Image: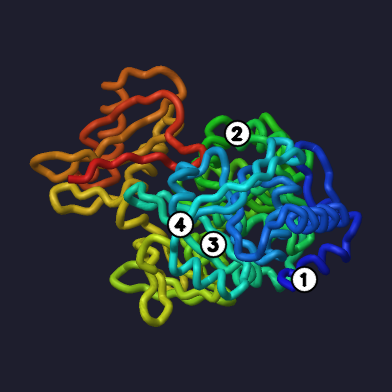
């Protein structure tokens, strides 16, 4: 049976906490009972193998148990959230669906209904014929057109056959994000404890760390910037944290340096992964460095014309609505431009994020890091704006802690950038904005108008 190795492992620690959801503890024995009850429910409802099942919710004991039951039943699992990167209707128009489970916030209450959306897809059709359990995730794509990524559920989870030391961790990344899926399976496969929260605000996350003595926080640079900017480590007792991992976007060196000072007893680890190939093993050169070594069992890397390519034993089956992205030898073009020093890589950014100023290539993160060092600056997002003469000009949107005249801020930004960067990288426009410069997934929100 699929995932029997995982369920057998759960049975070895029946009284240990598998989940703590909104202060509700669920042991591994109770998790096994939930999985069994969902298997029975699937049989009772007549959910057949190969059918596509949408699970709308977040990481709770019940939603996780349902995913394992669906895997046991050889279904195609489509996890979605109310804040999904793509609209539900747009997603399901690509994948189709047969059933819909909707979970309430508390995780316990749910509804199940037939949700028939036809979608003829030859790749999915041939995959279903193998009787394997599948997982479909969506990305917004660089153009905003959603890409549907099909994974073999069992292939992805085989990465966790080797058991690691248990941790208490929060699945920060969302229910429909590969990184979130990877986090929850890594925690439970190592018989650790998943601490799930109602929302991913600084307050909720920090309160959960304090109350439940969370030892691992896997998150994003944008969230860590917020934590350090508002001195969360002084408001809450976060001393239980032993490891903080960050990925999904470029980490500003300024934020990393602040983080190192705020959490001197926590190991800081940059991670790297893609929904298409999985999350690679990583090791930062040191806690204050943006250089890392990546790879590990099941992964190979190479650099072609400055771009990182990855070959993975855990790769997706393919896109449902796009070309594969793999070459004939199984290598995937990540589109991430990198620098290399020996065995270490430094991620510079996606080619699609580049700003073209009069033929000169500019990485937003390089400019953001300079501006982040300025006093009164909480956050900044740099992007390109179309320009008839230069192709693009650089725009810096800045969030400030205290009110400041925009001309004063512009003068400080331009002076700092002229000191540290070449002239074409100096922002042409500086805009003070209110609110957030990140998405609901705590990733930097940039807009670029490309001519």
What is the spatial separation of the Cα atoms under label 3 and label 2, in whole angstroms?
A: 27 Å
What is the spatial separation of the Cα atoms under label 1 and label 4, in whole angstroms?
A: 31 Å
The residue beneath circle 2 is 201
| Foreground residue among 354 and 33 | 33
Mark 3 or mark 2, which is nearer to you? 2
Look at the numbered disc 1 and give the secondary structure of its residue: helix
Mark 1 or mark 4, which is nearer to you? 4
10 Å crowding of disc 3: few (<14), some (14-19), many (20+): many
Quadrant of the image for the N terminus? bottom right
What is the spatial separation of the Cα atoms under label 4 and label 3, in whole angstroms?
A: 43 Å
Sequence-first disc among 4 and 3: 4
What is the spatial separation of the Cα atoms under label 2 and label 1, in whole angstroms?
A: 36 Å
Residue 399, image quadrant = top left
Q: Is residue 254 visible?
A: no
Look at the numbered disc 3 and give the secondary structure of its residue: strand
The reply to whether dot 2 and dot 4 touch (C-beta < 8 Å) is no
What is the spatial separation of the Cα atoms under label 2 and label 4, in whole angstroms?
A: 37 Å
Establish if 153 lies above or below 380. below
The residue beneath circle 1 is 4
Sequence-first disc among 1 and 3: 1
Look at the numbered disc 4 and give the secondary structure of its residue: loop
Using the image, tell me which numbered label, if any, was put on residue 119.
Answer: 4
Mark 2 or mark 1, which is nearer to you? 1
């Amino acid at each position: 049976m699929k995932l029997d190795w995982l369920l057998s492992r759960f049975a070895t620690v029946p009284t240990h906490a598998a989940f703590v959801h909104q202060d509700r503890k669920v042991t591994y024995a109770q998790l096994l009972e939930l999985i069994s009850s969902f298997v029975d429910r699937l049989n009772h409802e007549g959910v057949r193998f190969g059918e596509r099942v949408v699970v709308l919710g977040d990481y709770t004991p019940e939603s996780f148990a349902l995913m394992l039951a669906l895997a046991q039943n050889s279904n195609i699992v489509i996890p979605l959230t109310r804040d999904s990167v793509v609209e539900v209707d747009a997603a399901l128009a690509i994948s189709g669906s047969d059933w819909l489970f909707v979970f309430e916030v508390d995780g316990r209450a749910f509804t199940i209904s037939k949700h028939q959306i036809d979608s003829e897809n030859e790749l999915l059709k041939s995959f279903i014929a193998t009787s394997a359990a599948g997982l479909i995730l969506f990305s917004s794509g660089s153009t905003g057109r959603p890409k549907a990524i099909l994974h073999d559920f069992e292939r992805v989870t085989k990465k966790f056959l080797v058991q690691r030391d248990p941790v208490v961790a929060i699945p920060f990344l969302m229910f429909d994000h590969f990184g979130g899926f990877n986090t929850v399976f890594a925690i439970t496969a190592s018989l650790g404890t998943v601490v799930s929260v109602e929302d991913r605000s600084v307050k909720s996350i920090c309160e959960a760390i304090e109350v439940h003595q969370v030892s691992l926080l896997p998150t994003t640079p944008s969230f860590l910037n917020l934590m350090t900017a508002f001195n969360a480590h002084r408001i809450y007792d976060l001393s239980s944290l032993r490891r903080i991992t960050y990925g999904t976007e470029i980490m500003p060196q300024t934020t990393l340096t602040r983080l190192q000072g705020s959490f001197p007893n926590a190991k800081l680890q940059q991670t790297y992964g893609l929904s298409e190939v999985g999350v690679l093993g990583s090791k930062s050169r040191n806690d204050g460095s943006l250089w890392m070594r990546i790879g590990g069992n099941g992964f190979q890397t190479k650099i072609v014309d400055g771009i990182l390519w990855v070959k993975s034993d855990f790769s997706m089956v393919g896109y449902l609505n796009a070309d594969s992205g793999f070459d004939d030898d199984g290598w995937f073009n990540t589109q991430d431009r990198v620098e290399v020093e020996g065995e270490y890589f430094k991620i510079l950014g996606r080619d699609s994020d580049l700003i073209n100023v009069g033929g000169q290539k500019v990485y937003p993160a390089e400019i953001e890091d300079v501006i982040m060092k300025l006093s009164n600056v909480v956050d900044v997002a740099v992007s390109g704006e179309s320009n008839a003469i230069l192709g693009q000009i650089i725009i810096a949107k800045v969030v400030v802690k205290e009110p400041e005249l925009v001309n004063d801020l512009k003068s400080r930004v331009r002076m700092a950038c002229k000191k540290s960067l070449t002239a074409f990288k100096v922002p042409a426009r500086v805009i003070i904005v209110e609110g957030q410069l990140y998405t609901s997934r705590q990733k930097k929100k940039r807009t670029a108008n490309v001519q």
